[in-house]
Image: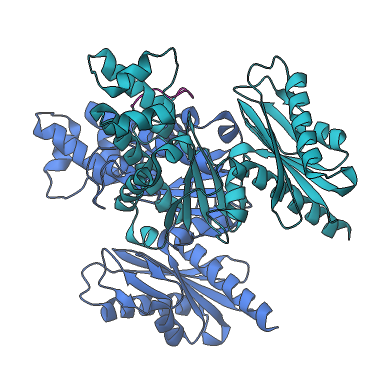
Chain colours: A cyan, B blue
């Protein structure tokens, strides 16, 4: 049996683990909730156990495991494999890479979660074979990752890819990051919920009103889609505007980066599907110069929740191969 | 005598030529006006003659010339070395590279003019030794070029680098490109002049009024600086706003690209100097995430008008070396 790879995707609310066989096929999965855990050690135990469960379910023991890759939120110190900090988990300068390597007795790499997802789409999803790719994930926030010249592009700062924090509406709504008019502040699920809440406060009534009356912080993609499908005019207007503004951001980046593929994913894109992507695409192509529009493909992500585990596993395998070559 | 390179910078109003010695030093220059020429052949003759004058002045004959490089406006077909079209000159699918190669009996390369300028700053100016660079030139329009992983980045489309056409103010003023709220539409000299003209129409009077009463389309950098220095409140406000919005665009791109150096040049930057760059820098750093701000240098271009001739000459020399290696 040739060596398998364990890929892990750590999110603010859940952890997914998958075992990939030597052909890159997922042979087993495991998942667990991460929400509510008190400290970094408890979260780490959850991650480790989820990994072990996936390996067990695949029937892969340590002798047949080659490496571990994990995609994690928050800025990462790539030199040490540590998570510097995260918004939703208690990690603070936590040596996630070294701890996973110790736990599984194999080399482990840590990558930014969104980068790992984009890399998964590059190796096994919507961007297979491409060289210049932007991945954009629209959910609670808007995250992104770049593939340039066929490789993951982290930039000089190692913090590239933050497409949610380009300013598309200078002086516009305040973003969670403190600035005004970020793409995330006008087109994420958080922004969409805020705009709907505001209109309801001003007296709007429609199918969506019921959902917002629930004890909930944010409308889910499902809530929004239900209201949209039942003809809620406010939700339609807000969703169409969000798609248009995402397109404005994408068009801007097409002009700067002359991309080959833009891959769109995340909860909002999955809930609203092709019509949402079409609206983004039309707005982006209206803005991009002809040369930057005529050859780009704008498409939906294909791997869903698997993107992160596949991407981090692929990155772990490639790091292993590079090291083997160096030593060979 | 080792081989020299001829570098040419073709603009809408002038053509510059320079001869670089094997150490990359400019040993002679020539220039001519291009404005008002009727057709492509006449412009080409001007380019060729300017090149010959520079070679003559350097005392370099064809035997000691290795290659020719030219930076030219407009989208370029890199496969054929043709200019597809230009806004200010009559070139239309003009085979500029092959024609220069024929004229000088040496290999010739054609590059986008702004890319050539950024490449000059990379090899001999403010970005020496850097790997992730954005060059931004603020004049009549706003142009840009990217160096990623140490090399000129043209993107999949070959049309990357159009930083003047990222949208910073969705729904804002109409741009020459047809869109609304492009960086160029809110912060170029054209936008600055438009805003000042509008305020004067509404009744504003100040030192700048006189300059705009002249028979002129646009305020020059010098006009603007004079009014600014004599305390014109309108000009101050408009210039400060332009700097801030350029900073907004740069901060956005820092978040996407995690850059090492941002080099700022062009007529407006040269006219207003360090104070203008400081304002851009403050706005950019306010927007960029800490990880994307803490290591980036934001600085003025160093080469002025020489950037384009040096950059295109360097690109020609490197293309020659690559070909020699392939054949060797």
Above or below for B64 versus A82: below
Give the x, y percent position of residue B50.
38, 75
Quarter where residue B168 is shown: top left
Question: Of residues A72 and A66, which is closer to you in this image?
Answer: A66
Q: Quadrant of the N terminus of chain B?
A: bottom right
How many numbered marks, from 0 up?
A: 0
Identified at 43% across, 57% down, the residue is A297
Residue A304 picture location, percent across and down:
55, 43
Dominant secondary structure (helix, strand or loop) of the stretch shown in magenta: loop
Residue drawn at point x = 75 percent, y = 19 percent: A42
User: Which picture quadrant has residue A56?
Assistant: top right
Query: Residue A230 or B182: which is nearer the viewer?
Result: A230
- The magenta-colored residue range is A172-178
Residue A173 within the magenta-colored segment of the rendering: yes
Horizontally, residue A107 falls left or right of residue B280, namely right
Most foreground residue, A30 or B116: A30
Location of residue B305 in the rendering, given as x and y in whole percent from the top left corner: 42, 57
Residue situated in front as seen by the camera: B46 or A143 = A143
Q: Is residue B250 visible?
A: no
Asked whether, in this view, residue A129 is left or right of residue A5, the answer is: left
In the image, residue B291 lies in the stretch drawn in magenta: no
Quadrant position of the C terminus of chain B in the picture? bottom right
């Amino acid at each position: 049996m040739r060596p398998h790879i364990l890929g892990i995707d750590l999110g603010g609310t859940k952890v997914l683990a998958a075992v990939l066989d030597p052909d890159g096929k997922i042979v087993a999965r495991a998942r667990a909730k991460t929400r509510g855990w008190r400290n970094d050690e408890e979260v780490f135990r959850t991650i480790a156990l989820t990994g072990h469960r996936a390996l067990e379910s695949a029937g892969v023991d340590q002798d047949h495991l080659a490496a571990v890759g994990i995609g994690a939120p928050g800025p990462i110190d790539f030199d040490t494999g540590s998570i510097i900090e995260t918004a939703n988990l208690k990690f603070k300068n936590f040596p996630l890479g070294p701890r996973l390597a110790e736990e599984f007795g194999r080399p482990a790499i840590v990558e930014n979660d969104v980068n790992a997802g984009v890399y998964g789409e590059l190796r096994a999803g919507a961007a297979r074979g491409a060289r210049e790719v932007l991945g954009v994930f629209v959910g609670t926030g808007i995250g992104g990752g770049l593939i340039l010249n066929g490789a993951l592009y982290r930039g000089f700062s190692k913090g590239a890819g933050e497409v949610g924090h380009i300013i598309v509406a200078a002086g516009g709504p305040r973003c969670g990051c403190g600035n005004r008019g970020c793409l995330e502040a006008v087109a994420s699920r958080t922004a969409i919920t805020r705009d709907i809440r505001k209109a309801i406060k001003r007296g709007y009534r429609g199918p969506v009103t019921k959902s917002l009356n629930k004890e909930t912080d944010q409308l889910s993609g499902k809530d929004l889609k239900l209201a949209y499908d039942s003809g809620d005019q406010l939700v339609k207007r807000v969703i169409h505007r969000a798609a248009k503004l995402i397109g404005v951001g994408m068009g801007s980046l097409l002009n700067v980066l002359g991309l080959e593929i833009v891959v769109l994913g995340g909860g909002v894109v999955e809930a609203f599907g092709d019509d949402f992507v079409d609206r983004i695409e039309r707005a982006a192509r209206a803005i991009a110069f002809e040369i930057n529009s005529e050859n780009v493909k704008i498409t939906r992500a294909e791997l869903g929740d698997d993107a992160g585990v596949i991407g981090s596993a692929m990155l772990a395998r490639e790091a292993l191969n590079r090291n083997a070559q160096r030593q060979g």
